[in-house]
Amino acid sequence: MTGSRGRVGVPTWIFLPALAGACFVLLPLLAIVLRTPWSRFFELVTSEASREALQLSLRTSATSTVLCLVLGIPMALVLARTEFRGQGLLRSLVLLPLVLPPVVGGIALLYTFGRRGLLGESFEVLGVQVAFSTTAVVLAQTFVALPFLVVSFEGALRTAGQKYEVVAASLGARPTTVLRRVTLPLVLPGLVSGTVLAFARSLGEFGATITFAGSLQGVTRTLPLEIYLRRETDAEAAVALSLVLVLVAVLVIGFARQGRGSSL
């Protein structure tokens, strides 16, 4: 045993692959920084198209994160605190967007909410068009980000156990009171982690968005789509906007860590 009292050290050889892994993640980010055209940086990132794309990304990502919270918290609670037949299959289906190619998710959404989709025709009767609108961007981001919140929150619920909830219930607290005053405060760090992951995933969503929502400036063209389009015509602008997206993601994660210590 090595290291300070109360802590178990790790084998020395572990540091070599750990360093290789860190380099694998950090070197591409360093490459972006080195290739950024700093003399034109502010000109590129403050153009009208860039500002609209960034504002749309932040607005839709915030909305989709709220949707993830509204839908994901109940889903995680049901998966972690109940038992029923087919629960394993349901969990696998809920987490499917984690491994599904985003473009497939976009096609699935298109055939659900599109004009000739499963629910799209009903929306069309009501005069509501979902596909290729800002609403479609939010739905696409929610579809791919929701599993991140469910996985994180369900894991926190299972780790916390039910000891304090059982005590509260034995003292006469109703299930809603137990949820509000015991469960949620107990697993708040896990909920924060899931929320941050969902927001970051929404911010970087590309495949499902371009398939389901298209790319219309100011309406559906988020920052990842703007970067992809600029890559074809202005590579320097694409690099500058990529750096902006990286910085926003770092700020989001850093803000979350500062707000809840180092447990993220």
Image (cartoon, rainbow, N blue to C red):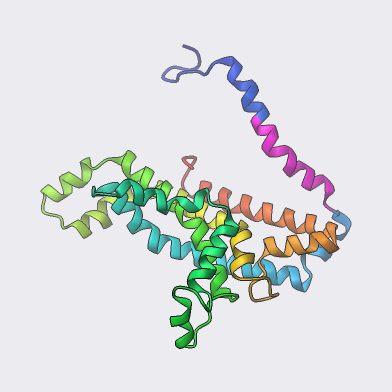
The residue lying at 60 percent from left, 16 percent from top is: 13
Q: Report the side of 66 relative to 225 (left or right).
A: left
Q: Is residue 164 above or below residue 126?
A: above
The residue lying at 45 percent from left, 64 percent from top is: 66
The residue lying at 43 percent from left, 47 percent from top is: 152
Please state the horizontal and vertical placement of residue 74, each as a whole percent of the image. Answer: 33, 58
Q: Is residue 53 above or below residue 6?
A: below
Farthest residue toward the right? 39
Q: Is residue 228 magenta?
A: no
Please state the horizontal and vertical placement of residue 15, each as a whole percent of the image. Answer: 61, 22
Farthest residue toward the top? 1
Considering depth in this image, is 2 or 243 the residue closer to the camera?
Answer: 243
Asked whether the viewer can see residue 184, the reply is no
Please state the horizontal and vertical placement of residue 43, each as a whole percent of the image. Answer: 83, 65
Q: Report the side of 194 relative to 170 (left or right).
A: right
Q: Is residue 27 magenta?
A: yes
Magenta-colored span: 21-36
The residue lying at 64 percent from left, 56 percent from top is: 248
Q: Quadrant of residue 59?
A: bottom right
Asked whether the viewer can see residue 163, the reply is yes
Q: Quadrant of residue 134?
A: bottom right
